[in-house]
Structures are given as C-alpha cells and as structure tokens.
Image (cartoon, rainbow, N blue to C red):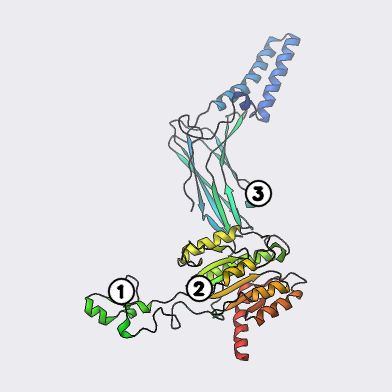
Amino acid sequence: MSGVRRSDPYDDEGPGPVREGGLWRALGGLTTRGRSFLAAGIAAGACAYVLGQPDLLRVGLLLAVLPLACVLVVHRTRYRVSSTRRLSPSRVPAMSQARVHLRVENVSRLPTGLLMLQDRVPYVLGPRPRFVLDRVEPGGHREVSYRVRSDLRGHYPLGPLQLRLTDPFGMCELTRAFEASDTLTVVPRVDPLPMVRLVGESAGYGDSRTRALALAGEDDVIPRGYRHGDDLRRVHWRSTARYGELMVRREEQPHRARCTVVLDTRQSAYHGAGPDSAFEWAVSGAASVASHMLERGYACRLLTDTGSCVPGPDGPGGSGGFGDDSSEAAGLLLEALAVVDHSANEGLSAAYDVLRGGQEGLTVAFLGELDDEQARLAGRMRQRTGGAIAFVLDGRDEGAGAEGPLRTLREAGWTAIQVLPGDHLADLWRQADRYHQHEGAGR
C-alpha cells in the first residue's frame, strides 16, 4: 500500500495549493443557473428603467444580487480539509483491478457544506471518479473508494484530488485542488509455470547442490556457530563437543543456482503494438520466468539487449546483478519490466558482452526477429557451464522465416522454441522440457 498523503488546501495558516485567483476569477465559477439569474436581473432592471416600474426594479435587483452574494460566500469559504489516498495494492498486474481509498477529514471547528470530489486519473485507467459528500461535522471524516484497471503496464499518476465547492442554491461552483498525488504501478502479467527440470539447471538446495568446500576432509572442516534456521543435519558434532555449543559445517552451505533472463527489446525485432502484441508477450514471459525461478530458490537477474542488468551490479547480491533476496529481487525485476520499452539497438552485442563473462547458470532468452548474423551472435551467448532456452517470436508470416534462426540456435546448444500467436508460456515451458528429454534420448 502507498504512503499517506495529506494537504490542507483551505487552511489560511498552513501550506496548501495556490488559490485560484481573486474575486473576478470566482465570478467565472457561476453556474448556468447563476448566469441566468444574473442576466434576468439585469434585463429586469433595464426594463424597469425604460418602463418606469419601480417594483420590477426590486425584482431585478433581487435576481442580480443573489448569484453575486453566492459568489462572495463561496469565494470567502475557508474550510480546513485534509485528504488521504491509499492504494490497495499499489502494484498490480496488467488486466487486474486496484482499489483507491479516499479519506476526507474536516479539521476545522466549523461544519462544511456540500462537497463534490473528483480525483484525476489517466484516461487508460477509466473515467474520472466523482463523489458528492454531505455536510461534514467538525472533526468528522468521510471515506469513499473507486476501482481502476489498466491493460497496459506502466506508472500512472493518481491525483491530485479536486474539491468543488458550491452554494445551497447552486449559483456558484469553485474548484480547488489538493497537492498530494500517488503513483500506481501496473506490472506485466505473471503466468504460473509448471515445475519441470530444464536442461542445464541444478537446484540450489537438494541432493545435487554444489558445496563450497565439498572436497575438504574431516580434519579440514572449518565450523561456525549455529544460527537460527540452520539445518540440524549440518551440525558438526565433534566441534560441538569441543566448544560446548552447536557448531555447523561451513562446507555444507549450498551454492545458490543462478538464472539470467534475457529480454530482446529491439524495436526492429517486433511487429504490432498493444496488449496482445508480441513484445508484450515477451515482457510478460520474462516476468513469469523470473518470478518462477525466484520462487524455486534461484538467484535471478534480468538482462536486456542494451546491456542493462536488473538488479544492478550494486543491487541485491552485488555479484553481476544477481539478486539473493528473492522478495527484493522480484520487486526490482517487476518494477523494471513495468516501464521497459523498445530500444533503438540493431543488434544483441551489448547483451553478449555482459554474458561472455562466464557467469554460471541457466539462461532463458525471449528473442524477437533474428537475421543470420544476430542468430549466430545469440548462439554464442550460451553459457558453457549452464543450460540455455530461447523463445523466439518471429512475426514474419507467422514464424515461417524463423526456421533458420531456430536451427542456428539449436546447433549452438540452445533449446530453441518457436512462439506463434496464441501460444501459452506454460505449454511452451513443458515443450522445452520434452524437447530436452528427446534430445537427450537421441544422443
């Protein structure tokens, strides 16, 4: 949920938004009814002067003075009102709804009149919500809420909240605005993926885990003190008896497996736009794979064709951009994918320069249209010590031109899967596992 945002737009002593002009500008707040009364009063006064009817002049004065008096009253209104906006949740997947809660509190000693609220929201989130609040007693508050939904990922500003004041006769209406605003983050849709054992992956924890000092002998063990959460099977009983406290083996600490998700963002590699475009499918796929691997205990990072890496070198993990804190890394990855856009790059050389460092682990790539040169370059991205899976989205005649790049990637050791319109990532994830098993059986 977002933080609390407050402002007091009608507090003469406290900070608030700039008041919108003086009395002359307040006259612009006359409603159709107010303008009609004023015009009728002026017309009645003119007729009374021409016809010499003093009674008609009194009626004209009443009609003209009433809207002007309402303008003066509304203009002089100085309510002290605070507002609070709360997003639930503040980060929502695309095509899902979020609820915005508004709380308006009267912090003055006088009751308010009729208040009309309108919150500013971008067009893609839906129509601007409007609410009418009855009289709010001193120290009282009112709470309202509305829903927003976006099919497009990104950052969307909410607010500032606008408050419209009106008189009991509906002659004048003035709009004032709070200062505070919030940001709703719409992240890519994350699809659940099945649990399969992919080519080249090794679990970070389990029977096949890599140990830091696996070849150390019993006499070479360097124990450390027991920490909350350590597996009791790692207790080194000889050291425990020697020191009189629980000690665990250092060599029992597993090496966490790593995964790099490569996202091709080149504008020339994709065709179409909108929520159902190939590029949005690739962004959603990258988010799904990254989330899935983090849930499985992997240290995961996102790499684009521009060479940018999330988490960054100094982020969680601090080693080549791999995030060790799953929750923090997942948040960073989704935030980055929420705003990722097409790049002007023509090739994948920047991503290749990052990957050729030889970081061990699984590589999962989402690639757009590839020519022969870029297909060969992508083939060399495969880590020698880890597995590599590529999902190729080629829009040329529904993928008819992708056979060459797919063959090049497979010859380089990739498990290359062609993505066609309407394909689901979960099915392709299983297909990658079956393809690897078939290749392994054929060797």
Residue labelled with disc 1: 224
Q: Cα distance, mark 3 to mark 2?
A: 41 Å
Is residue 428 visible in this depiction of the protein? yes
Residue 187 is drawn in which quadrant?
bottom right
**Circle 3 — which element?**
helix
The mark closer to the camera, 3 or 2, is: 2
Residue 334: quarter of image: bottom right
State which tag comes first along the sequence, 2 or 1: 1
Taking the image as shown, residue 234 lies to the left or right of residue 29, namely: left
Looking at the image, tell me whether mark 3 or mark 1 is earlier in sequence order.
3
Q: Position of residue 287 (x, y in %)?
A: 57, 66
Point out the tag, 3 or 2, that comes first from the N-terminus: 3
Please tell me how crowded label 3 is: few (under 14), some (14-19), or many (20+) other residues with Cα within 10 Å: few
277 lies left or right of 253: right
Q: Position of residue 425 (x, y in %)?
A: 62, 72
The kind of residue on which mark 2 rests is Arg
Q: Secondary structure at mark 2?
A: strand
Query: For mark 3, what is the residue?
Result: 123
Above or below residue 406? Residue 147 is: above
Residue at the limit of the structure toward the top, as seen here: 52
Q: The C terminus is located in which quarter?
A: bottom right
Q: Residue at x 47, y 46 (%)?
A: 4
Q: Which residue is mark 2?
A: 258
